[in-house]
Amino acid sequence: MLLAVVSAVWVGSEIVLGIVRHSRSGESVRRDRFSIAVLWICIAGAATGGSMLRAVRAAKMPGGATTFFIGIALIMIGIAIRWTAIFTLRRYFTVDVSIRTDHQVIQHGIYRVIRHPAYAGSLVSFIGLGIAFMNWISLAVMVLGTLIGFSYRISIEERELIAALGDDYRRYAARTKRLIPGVF
């Protein structure tokens, strides 16, 4: 029941975000290249596959309720990281890849240490979901599926940011990591 409630809040927040944070004509130029569709297909596939595979007994994680609650905590931490990133970007955040006419590199807050904290937060939540499923195969499917989607999306986004912001974004990218501070 708890997993269903936490998941409903998570999915609900993403639906609201998808409705209210699309780029608007005149303010920005869309450069998405179907990355939002690829991302959602990968996420849906990972969530569906991970859920279906959680019944595989040979891949059950140890720890019982403790493992489950660690997973729930990671989902919530990931949501908090994602929303912190969104609120930091404010008007520059859209669910589709787009460049505003007044776009600039944001380098404060969480963006001081990582280039794509909204994706990193989502990844933490998906890791949490895999752990809450208490199954190693589910966890692997969740991580692999979301990483494929995020990798494509990040490649599109970074190409467009470099094209629009040039050396400012290149310098920022040179001193920050994509998803894991100090690592990757």
Image: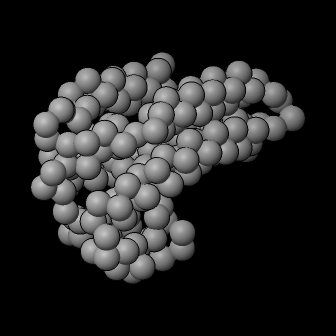
The percent position of residue 134, horizontal first and vertical second, equals: 67, 36
Coloring scheme used: one colour
Relative vertical location of residue 163 with respect to residue 28 in this rendering, above or below: below
Relative vertical location of residue 93 with respect to residue 184 in this rendering, above or below: above
At 81% from the left edge and 28% from the top edge, which residue is drawn? 56
The percent position of residue 18, horizontal first and vertical second, equals: 31, 28
- Left or right: 71 in relation to 169: right
Query: Which of the pair 129/105 is nearer the observer?
Result: 105
Query: Which of the pair 16/55 is nearer the observer?
Result: 16
At 59% from the left edge and 48% from the top edge, which residue is drawn? 147
The percent position of residue 65, horizontal first and vertical second, equals: 59, 37
The percent position of residue 2, horizontal first and vertical second, equals: 45, 25
For residue 47, say whether it is visible: no
**What is the count of numbered marks?**
0
Q: Determine the residue located farthest toward the right in the rendered image.
A: 58
At 34% from the left edge and 30% from the top edge, which residue is drawn? 14
Q: Quadrant of residue 132?
A: top right
**Placement of the C terminus among the 4 image quadrants:** bottom right
For residue 59, say whether it is visible: yes
Q: Quadrant of residue 174?
A: bottom left
At 29% from the left edge and 60% from the top edge, which residue is drawn? 164
- Left or right: 73 in relation to 89: right
Relative vertical location of residue 110 with respect to residue 154 in this rendering, above or below: below
- Left or right: 19 in relation to 178: left
Q: Quadrant of residue 28?
A: top left
